[in-house]
Image: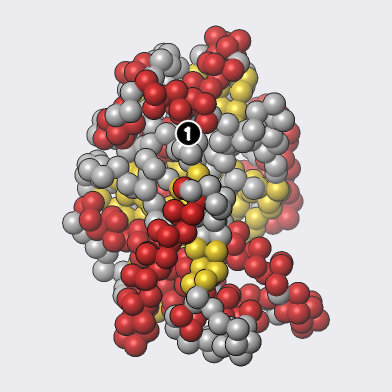
Amino acid sequence: MSESYLMALDAGTGSVRAVLFDTDGNQIGVVQQEWEHLSDPRYPGSMNFDWTHNWELTCGCIRGVLEKTGIDAHAIAGISTTCMREGILLYDRDGNEIWACANVDSRSNDEVAQLVRQDPELEKELYAQSGEAYALGALPRLLWVKNKMPEIYEKTARLGMFNDWLIYRLTGVMPLEASNGSTTGILDLQKKAFDPAIAERVGIRGDIFPEIHECGTRAAQVSEKAAAETGLAAGTPVIVGGGDSQLGCIGVGVTKPGQAAVFGGSFWQYEFNTDSARTDPGCRVRVNCHAVPGVWQYEALAFQPGLVMRWYRDGFCQREAEIAEKTGEDIYDLMNREAEKVPAGANGMMCAFSDVMNFTCWKHASPTFTNFGLDAEQFSRYTFYRAILENAALVTRGHVELVREATGNMPSEVIFAGGASKSDLWCQILADVLKLPVTVPVVREATALGAAILAGVGAGIYSDIEDGVRRCVRMDKTFTPNSENEAVYDSLYSVWRKVYAAQLSLCDQGLTRNMWIAPGLS
């Protein structure tokens, strides 16, 4: 029997990619294309999704990975999809896309303010049922369409997410599922079904929400039209996928209640699995459906640690960039090697970027470095660099404690994946700050692997998700906490929380600008 392969399509915030795996979870090939979400100058904060051009890019990725690997399209046993969450598409009655926005869209300030004026307690009531706040959910965006583009609103027959849009383009079928659907704020967590009454409470029609399909079930098959566009074989099974963080958890084996993962990329997500859809009484942390049946996730987001690192690299590390270009070394490896020489706690200096999550009142202070001295040896650019690494870990500690307060539970270890986990120094700092073992998987870009596992389940390669995890997920190494550094970070964490609160108050007084603030907040 010839070897079979699994394909994952991943529609991320900044790019789309097609990834091929064998059935043991080994990545065979990937082709990626960057895409942009253009702002409409009439609407500040808008980030429009170009479904025509972006489907062309997706087709190019699929054709590219087939050509690059030389794999016969008929050898692909199954395809599944994943994507940035929160982005939404609207369709008319004929199934045509008529409006779409990416996850980073923040045009709905007026609508959030409108909702708060109408009923100051409504957001908390809806959160208790849906696990979502206005900050990232679809309700204010749909209200924006109703208010600002009534002709589009009247034509709307269905709402969808980007992972099911990929399936729709491949098959003509639109199977929306709960892991991404729950990020809309219109899905009842307990029932894992859209509740039209949620939409109707804010003045949105309740007849545009589809039935929910289970992740890992067969949706349809590649159509003749899509086969001609992509180079795939018509009839290839296409499997219901899920949101990027949930499938990332599958890709690192975090599938059972009590397990936890941190994904370190442009944003950092802390994910903690539970066996209950109960939400946080304080409305501070997000709750989503996992892509695994019978499991939910508390999720806390740190804004932009990866983008902060990129900014610092480009703005202050030109010397290391020159060395890296000459030697072929990674610039971050050069920076890490020097930052390792800086003591834990960065000689007492701190920075403020992302705050610990507060879902219904979400603000971040103006970016700040503080408590450094004019001693170039103690406070070099490597000290500042280490402080950035430590800051991301301190925010994550806040998130672990926040979820512990909400659930009464702590993980025994944390799985760390994503680009940040490539840094051994960052892994060790995270272990020291959290006072927990931090384990790094072999496949650190785990979202696509999670999608491939679901493709294998739906195609009958694996008996269930756990079987796929056993076959495909392998761990690389574990970082254990250093007791001396734990004490340093214990002291630093309590001070950092107070310093951050003081920095946030400067924004509240209008003296500095928030790095980010949720729509509708001032």
**Residue 270 vertical position relative to residue 208 in the rendered view, above or below:** below
Which residue is found at the position 58% from the left and 75% from the top?
385
In percent of width and height, residue 66 lies at 69, 49
Asked whether, in this view, residue 227 is left or right of residue 355, the answer is right
Residue 386 % position (x, y): 54, 77
Q: Residue at x 22, y 48 (%)?
A: 275
Q: Amino acid at mark 1?
A: Gly
Query: Would you name the residue on which mark 1 appears?
Result: 520
The quarter of the picture where residue 379 lies is bottom right
Q: Is residue 257 above or below residue 324?
A: above
Residue 87 on image: x %, y %: 54, 35
Residue 455: x, y in percent?
A: 47, 45
The reply to whether residue 481 is in sight is: no
On screen, residue 164 versus residue 358, left or right, reads: right
Q: Is residue 344 above or below residue 431?
A: below
- Colour scheme of the picture: secondary structure
Q: List the single residue furthest toward the left.
A: 408
Q: Residues within 10 Å of mark 1 (few under 14, many from 20)?
A: many
